[in-house]
Amino acid sequence: MKYAFIKEHSGEFEIKLMCKVLQVSRSCYYRWLGIEKQDDTELNELIKEIFEASKKTYGTRRIKRELLHTYGIVISRRRTGKIMRKLGLVCKTKKSFRVKTTDSDHPFAIAPNLLKQDFYVSAPNQVYVGDITYIPTKEGWLYLAVVIDLFSRRVVGWSMDARMKTSLV
């Protein structure tokens, strides 16, 4: 009865609005009408083509954006994801870059722990501590070595280099 009313008045009112007012889901209404889900073969081919052209790096967001801007096709991310799953398309993800700064397998002598985690110093110029860090730049990584007076917590000296060598420290 409700579906017939919606069909009868579809020229006067929006189907979406009538379904909401009559508390009927649109998908059930369209199923009642006998409208089957549209054939996705062309859409599948477009999604596969975009995915392959991106060297298998595009996910649902980028594919959705490409479909809209290039082909004028409006599609949800969920539907894009379902189609990608159905086609077995899995995008490559970038692995996070980790700088390896410690080489534990070396023949050099290991320095003894003289402080033993006691960082309290009563006078200046008695204890110095140092550290090395890396800084990402547009030209690559820069390594920074810093020496600090533990009493004043001020930088005594520093050095920068494009490579982490013993001369940096």
Image (cartoon, rainbow, N blue to C red):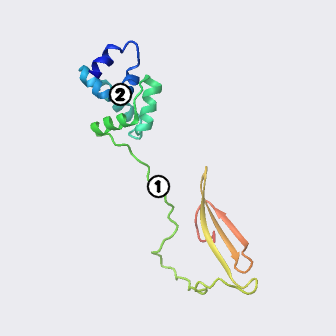
Q: Which mark is residue 7?
A: none
Quarter where residue 31 is shown = top left
Quote the CA–CA distance across marks 2 and 1: 30 Å
* Residue at the image position 33 percent from the left and 19 percent from the top: 6
List x then y, in percent, for residue 82: 32, 37
The answer to which of marks 2 and 1 sits earlier in the sequence is 2
Number of marks in the rendered image? 2
- 55 to 145, vertically: above or below: above
- 49 to 34, vertically: above or below: below
Q: In this view, does 127 lie to the left or right of 96?
A: right
List x then y, in percent, for residue 137: 61, 53
- Residue type indicated by callout 2: Leu
Residue 98 visible in the displayed image: yes
* Residue at the image position 28 percent from the left and 40 percent from the top: 88
- Residue type indicated by callout 1: Ser
Q: Which mark is residue 96?
A: 1
34 and 19: which one is in front? 19
- 106 to 13, vertically: above or below: below
- 74 to 142, vertically: above or below: above
* Residue at the image position 47 percent from the left and 76 percent from the top: 106
9 and 131: which one is in front? 9
